[in-house]
Amino acid sequence: ILFWSDDEIEELLKDSLCYEEAVDLRKEVALAVSVLDKILAAPVYTGLFRLPWEKQETKSLKGLSDAVMAAFVCILARAFQDDGDTEKLVPLLDILQHSDEPNVRHIMRKDTKAVEVRARYKLEAGTELLNQYRSEMDMPYHRFYTRFGFVPGMNQEPIVNLLRDKSPIFFVQNAEV
């Protein structure tokens, strides 16, 4: 959703459970782009380093916004929670695909800062390792989508269709009682 246009956010996510988080993430990216542009634009265009509060070129760095958005996506989609509330980037763990029926499990221990990955059962050589990023108990589907860009178990139906149809995954449903 970071690469969506403002119009797409308003059309598809307005009044959804993930709208506020999507808007907040986009504001965070915009702030990061603004700060980095103020720091990096002058050295790139003039060869001189200036502090952010000093007068600088008004020219912005081409491609900076896309690069910062891509960095945010990498961090959001590749952070794993330890046995507390802390999230960490774990090289190699992030290359495993998500599955609701994983064949491995990971444990990140705060005390030793170690990451353990163990098979849930005997695996044959060449079997793809599948991990569960988060369970629905830890993260509801609408947050899963905002964070990872997909909804577990919804591989067949395009997410845009679910949003247009006001799916209960994304929208609070009102029912007469």
Image (spheres, helix red, strand yellow):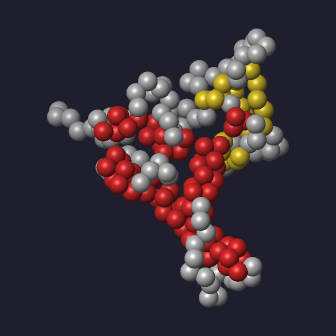
| Image height of 84 relative to 134, above or below | below
Q: Quadrant of residue 97?
A: top right
Tell me what residue is drawn at x 78 percent, y 32 percent.
Answer: 116
Q: Between residues 23 and 38, which one lies in front from this camera angle? A: 38
User: On the rendered structure, is 140 left or right of 113?
Assistant: left
Measuring from the top left, give residue 12's x and y in whole percent.
Answer: 34, 46
User: On the rendered structure, is 155 left or right of 71?
Assistant: left
Q: Quadrant of residue 119?
A: top right
| Image height of 176 relative to 68, above or below | above
Do we see residue 168 in this rendering? Answer: no
Measuring from the top left, give residue 139's x and y in whole percent.
Answer: 51, 39
Measuring from the top left, give residue 137's x and y in whole percent.
Answer: 51, 33
Tell me what residue is drawn at x 64 percent, y 81 percent.
Answer: 52
Tell me what residue is drawn at x 29 percent, y 35 percent.
Answer: 165
Tell me what residue is drawn at x 48 percent, y 45 percent.
Answer: 146
Residue at the farthest left position: 176
Q: Between residues 101 and 126, which one lies in front from this camera angle? A: 126
Report the label total. 0
| Image height of 49 relative to 175, above or below | below
Do we see residue 143 in this rendering? Answer: yes
Residue at the farthest bottom position: 55
Quadrant containing the C terminus is top left
Q: Between residues 92 and 141, which one lies in front from this camera angle? A: 92
